[in-house]
Every structure is written in structure tokens, then in C-alpha cells.
Amino acid sequence: MADDIKGTDTPAYKTPEVPEKPALEGLEAKLNEAWQAERIYHFDEDATRDEVYSIDTPPPTASGSLHVGHMFSYTQTDVVARFKRMRGKKVFYPLGWDDNGLPTERRVQNYYGVRCDPSRPYDPDYTPPEKPAKNQRDWDVISRQNFIELCEKLTVEDEKVFEDLFTTLGLSVDWRQTYRTIDDDSRAASQRAFLRDVTSGNAYTAEAPTLWDVSFRTAVAQAELEAKERPGAYYRYPFTTEDGSEVVIATTRPELLPACVALVAHPEDERYKHLFDKTVTSPLFGVEVPVKAHRLADPEKGSGIAMICTFGDMTDVTWWRELQLPTRALIGRDGRFSRENPEWITTEEGQANYEQLAGKTVHSAKEAVVQLLESHELLRAEPEKITHAVHFYEKGDKPLEVVTSRQWYIRNGGRDAERRDQLIERGRKIDWHPGFMRSRYENWVEGLNGDWLISRQRFFGVPIPVWYPLNDEGEPDYDNPILPSEDQLPVDPAGQPAPGFEESQRGVPGGFIGEPDVLDTWATSSLTPQIAGKWERDPQLFEKVFPFDLRPQGHDIIRTWLFSTVVRANSLHDTVPWTNTAISGWILDPDRKKMSKSKGNVVVPTEPLEQFGSDAVRYWAASAKLGADTAYEVGQMKIGRRLAIKLLNASKFAFGMGVTEQHIVGNADDAAVITEPIDRALLAKLRTVVDQATEQFENYDYARALQITESFFWSFTDDYVELVKDRAYGSQGEQAQASVRATLATTLDTLLRLFAPVLPFATDEVWRWWRQDSVHAASWPKAQDLDAVAGSAAVLDAVSEALTGLRRAKAEAKVKQRTEIISARVSGPQQEVGYIESALSDLQAATKARVLELVTEGETTQEIEISNVELAEME
């Protein structure tokens, strides 16, 4: 038969080796071992730029455990990577670990029961306690270097667990191309980028009001804010005018009364126009402050006139800057009021009142001020309870304060309209999937009100590579920082002397001090294309992969990771960092709420992987469109598992009918073997599926591609296979048998490749039953390869419709489908009846019909009708 089909020069083909009971269990371990040995996912470093498809993969935070949201989004990326690889691209698919920053610090603190004190000396023999103390006050206090060593140790352990889980999930990552955002290469890249931004003027240091988290004691950037609704109250009390009358203000922060620098109202507010540029005196503290006009004052809010305090919120900062007001900051980095009596409070009564606030937390100070106002009978109304939005650090649990401090910034368009327009234009050079996500990017850029604050007062991070000279009085000269040369990177100013100095000169007049802060974790993560692409370390590789072809990520970090990466590529390379971005949605719990560790509604990934298998979990993830928030659905995973099992069993069935690799029709010369119209009809449908699935994949709509392929597959197994089963066993002769075998082989070969990106384990298991290599080393099917064998799809439609009608007749008669039909009448338009006649033997065999009377009647739009069905004896 092989010679009849392929000719005498055909190479030796593998005899299918099919297990007696195909199963999904154990495929992950077996096939991952094979893929690793065969180096299927290794990047070809000899590839040219036009051959490469590079992916800037999100580095997961190595600070605890993954959840199903990671499986969801990373699977969607992997589906694209596998498709591009089968399309002939040399896929550069690295993976990093985001292991610096606050999440890692918090995990290490809680895991070991330690706290960091940079003033403590390093203990080379330190060993953390076996169990952390329950009370944080009893935790070990260790040096910065000891703390960093514990961070390094724990993240490496976490990352190994994550890699094992991602491998089980089937990510086709090149595990040789991994990085850590805290390793030497990443630190060098991050510091190099910082130094170049400093040199070009894109990075600068300034003493300015800064959003501050009092728990973590670190500055916070605008992109890290989270507004939370919190209960509060308006307190109304009077300031005294020059003529002795009262001006009542309403505020939710009475504790800031001693930091008041002005009152402000809208320029058009008739109630207060007569007070503009005059002074009033504050209650309790007796400080004279001016009354100012500003457009941001809301006449409808409170009493229409507000206190400006330095600083209650960022609006205060705007007023302070634009109205050129003095600075009277009282809240320190520890979240407590200054213990020293402010110099601007000069009356004895005012000083005595302030002593009741000195050293208190913000909450306690508020209570103290309210009590003072009550005791002096200054409250002009009962507190009015309200609910209002309060800014928090996204990882914090206390409201942010505004603290004056020296910080480092990168210009991001927040203070520069020209740069802002440039960054918006960069966003328009990127293809967004889905397209509407671009508006989120543009809205964020247009709403920026300041530059990107990149310094953090933490320990485990990339050190800011700067030292400052000290003058003869020991004061630092911040305007003339000492910078290392790039060949010295990475450096740690806290542990290394400044260039040209000895360590003994640290902290002494005429010497130097090191910058104590580290870079915001986003300042390093914004360089993942540069880090993964080995910027400046391997120029040839970088030229091949940058700008990257794809950035996949969640929509919640468009404002942080995506935007910051665009900012850095713009300043460092004058280009976009990638040409496409694929934005995934959130995973929702069954109540349609976002899954998060803080809410306690997270599902651990190992649970569904162990219960349903990796292909089933991948099917659930790949069924969701990009950008769509998707519920965690066990039912969808069950459908995916059923599909994968059916693929195994249908393939076994085909091989059991004598189908082998040699039956695949690969060119026009082979086309003559397919003689039956219904076989050519199936291949016509398959050709359309390949064409449509390819188009959808190219548009990053893998979910639609999966839907199209799956719909064809179920029709193929439920209808076509049942129709041709008898013929495949030879009931209609060798020629008809050869036709069906060639059709089954060609269809199975194509379906395995179409499903391979989504169901990598089941498809490769079947592929290896009858092929010498892996389906993931095969090429993506081409619709034109089926041109020579594609007939009229309408043939299969008509026959399937008749098959459905005959099955229905048996179901309505409440007999089993294997019951014989003695006779039945099949009627319909002439063309459809002709199609059915061309496959009549298949239809009779599939329905066990002795006689099928074909009758032409009705219009061309009329459906096939089944009537006069006579069944054998009821079972």
C-alpha cells in the first residue's frame, strides 16, 4: 500500500506505537525531559534579526508563592511563543526573576523573623533563628549585609520552585536565558542606565515634598498609589480676621493646623474676595497666615475656603509651589510630629498647645487637636462624618504622608509637555492587543503631575551609584555628586569608597559619604529588555532582539512597568522598547472579584495542575481573550481535559484503522489518492480552519483560533470519523480505504499542529507515537498545502445534516444508535441530495441503514428532511 501511495523512493516510516490505554497522567515529566534533551526551545544565536521573534517576558516576583493568575497570563504568552516558533521564527524567550524590593524584604522579615538596622556591624557567622519569634519586637536585628544575604538565599529557593511549576505548565522558555533583577549583570545594567540618564540630564536629585509611607519609611512614586475609601469627618473651626471676625474652614485633617501656611479660596468666590492678600490668625497656635486665591480651590467643598498646610496632600504641594509659600513641615519620616517646638509658633499659648502634639503619631495628634478645639470651644459644628478617598502605598496599610526629603527623579513628562507628547507618540508606535488598552496608557501619561521618583529608602535593591563630597564643615555637596565609571559597575556606595578616596575618609570633613538609598524596583524592571538582551554585554545579541517584538503583561501595571519601560527606551535608545504589547486581564474568583493574596481568595497553581493536568489548565487560559478579566472556572478546565483525552483516543482510533505517517498527503502528486467527495469536503473545511486560525493567531487572538480549531475537531470526530469508519476498515475496497486513510492522516497531522501551542503535552504525545521528532519542532500548517485535495465543503455539510437527522429519529424512538434502520426517506434540494448520494455508502454504514431513499424536492434553501423511518425491532 505504501508504494501505491508514495512511490518506491519513500523513506522508512515509523510504525505507530500506541499505548494500550492512552492517558494524560505523567506526560508533563516525560515530555519536559525530552524537550530539554532535544533543546527544542533553545534560542538560535546565529539567527538574523529578521528571523528573530523576541519576547520581553514579565519577571515574576520571587517573594512567596505563585497563584493561578500567573498560570493564566504566562500560558497566554507561551501560546504565542509556540505559534511563532512553528511559523519559522527563532524565538528569544527568556525569563527573569524580580527578586529585589519591598515584597522580598517583607517575605524575608516574616520568614526568618529579622529586622534590618544599617548601623549594625556585619556578622559573618550569623545564623537566623529556626523559627521566627511571634512578636516582632523579639525579632533579630541584623546588619544590612546580613539582611541582604538572607534575601539572596530565600529568593534562590523560591525561584527554583517557580521554575519547576512553570516547567510543569509547559512554558517553552529557554531556561539558559534567565536573569535575576538583583544579580551582578542586572545591577550593572540598572546602574549604567541611571548614570547615562544623569549625564544626559534625564535624572536629577532634589529636595522636595514627597509621598511617604511611614510604615516602610520610604518614598513612594505616583504610579504606586492606591486610593482607598476610608471613613473621616469634617471639622469646622474659625480663623480670626484683622477686624476680629471669623472665617470658618472645614478640614478632614485638623492635626495639620500648626503647619498651616495660608488659607485659599477660588478667585471667583464672592464670599472671600474681600480677604484675598490679607492675613488671618490661626486658632490654638496664633500664627498669622495670608489668604490666597487659586483656581484649584473648590467652592462646593466644605466651607469653600481651605487650609494650605505643608503638607497634607499633593494639592497642598501644588498650592505651596505656585503661590510661593513658606515650608512648615512637622511630620517626619517616622510618621510622628516633630518633638521640637516650631519656630513660627511664638505665643506662649501656642507653644503650650503644640507641646501636647510633639512626638505623637498622626492619629494621636489628630485626637489631641480635636480635644484642644473642644476645650477652647472652637468647634463651630459637630464633626460631619464622611467617606473619602485616601492615598495609600499599594503595598502599605497606613495612609501616606507628604514629607520633605532629598530624592532622585527621572524625567517622565510629568513636568514637561514636550516630553509628555513624545511619550504619547511612542505609545502610538506600539501595536496594542487589544487596541483599546492604548487609551489607558495615554490617560496615565496625560494625568502625570510630577517626574518619576526612583529612590527608595530600603536595603535589598540596586544601590544608587553615587557618592557626595563633604566640605570642610562635613556637609555634603549634593550639586556635585561623585559618579563611578561604567567599567566599575556594579558598585555599592555603602560598602565601597568613592573613586579617588580611601574608606577612612568616609563621613569626615573633606571626605565623602555614600548615597544610602536604592533604586525603585521599577527602575530596574523598566530595563528588562536591556537586561534580558544583554545590553552592552553582548552587542550582537542585543541588535538581534531589541527592540523586542512582544511585551506581554497585565493591564494593572500599564502605568508602572509598561510606561516606565517606554520612558527608559526613549531616553536611552530613542526608540520604543517593543513593537507589540499583549495585555492580559485579571483572574476573578467565582464571585467575580479579583484574586489577590490580601483578599485571601487565591487558588494555588498546584491544585488545578494536579487535578486536571497542564493541558487542561492551559486550555482554560487560552480560551480567554487578551484584556478580558476571566473567572477561575473548573468547568472550563474539565472541558480542556476532555478535549485532550479525546485527542489521544481519536488518534489511537485512527492508528487502529491502519493510518500511518506515510498516508499524509503532502503535495499535489499525492492528491489523486483522495478519491471520495466527502474526504475532499473534510479537507476543504480543514483548509478554511487553517486559514482562519492562522489569521487569528497573527492578530494575537489565540482564543478565537482555538475556538475555530476545536469546533472543527469535534465535528471531525463526531461526524466524519463515524461516517468513514466502515470504509477505513476496507468495506468499500482498497481505493476507498486509501482515500480515507490519507484523509485521516492529513487531518490528524494538521490538527496536532493547530492544537500544539495550547495543548503541548497531548499533541506531542500523539506526534511521537507515529513520528520521529516533536510536534514543537514541526512547522505550522499552511492552507495552500491543502489546495490540491480540497473539494466542496458543502458535501460534508449535507451528509452531516442527514446523519444528524437519522440519529435524531433513533433518539426520538428511544432506541440505541446501533439499532438498524430498515428504510428511511431522505429528501431535500437537488444539489444537497446529490452530495448525500456521493457518500451514500458511508452514511448507510454509519447509521446502520439497509435502505435510504433519496428524494429531490423543495427549494435550494430548504433543509434536509428525514421521514418514513422504519427501524429494526426495538431494543
Image (cartoon, rainbow, N blue to C red):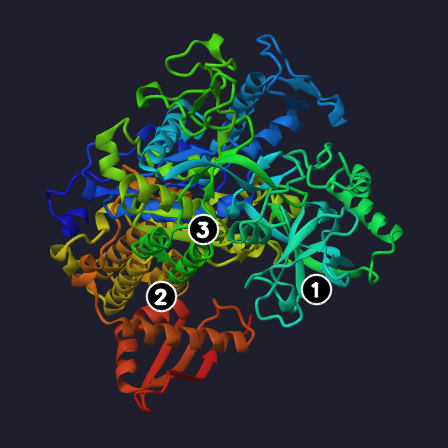
Q: Of the residues shown, which amino acid type is indicated by label 1?
A: Gly
Q: Residue at x 54, y 72 (%)?
A: 815
Nearer the viewer's eye, disc 2 or disc 1? 1
Task: Please rate how many residues cluster around mark 3, counting C-alpha atoms within 10 Å: few if below 14, some from 14 to 19, many from 20.
Answer: many
Answer with mark 1 or mark 3, whichever residue precedes in sequence. 1
State the CA–CA distance, disc 2 to disc 3.
52 Å
- The answer to whether one can see residue 618 in this image is no
On the image, numbered disc 1 is attached to which residue?
302
**As displayed, is residue 170 above or below residue 801?**
above
Kindly indicate the quadrant of the structure image that contains residue 106: top right
Q: Of the residues shown, which amino acid type is indicated by label 2?
A: Leu
* Residue 844 screen position, x and y as percent: 36, 71
Q: Residue at x 72, y 51 (%)?
A: 253
State the CA–CA distance, disc 2 to disc 1.
78 Å
Indicate left or right for 381 with 409 as reference.
right
**As displayed, is residue 797 above or below residue 66?**
below
Task: Please rate how many residues cluster around mark 1, counting C-alpha atoms within 10 Å: few if below 14, some from 14 to 19, many from 20.
Answer: some
Q: Contact (CB < 8 A) between labels 2 and 3?
A: no
Task: Please rate how many residues cluster around mark 2, counting C-alpha atoms within 10 Å: few if below 14, some from 14 to 19, many from 20.
Answer: many
Q: Contact (CB < 8 A) between labels 1 and 3?
A: no
Indicate left or right for 831 with 28 as reference.
left
Which residue sits furthest bottom? 858
Q: Secondary structure at mark 1?
A: loop
* Residue 629 screen position, x and y as percent: 52, 57
The front one of 102 and 302 is: 302
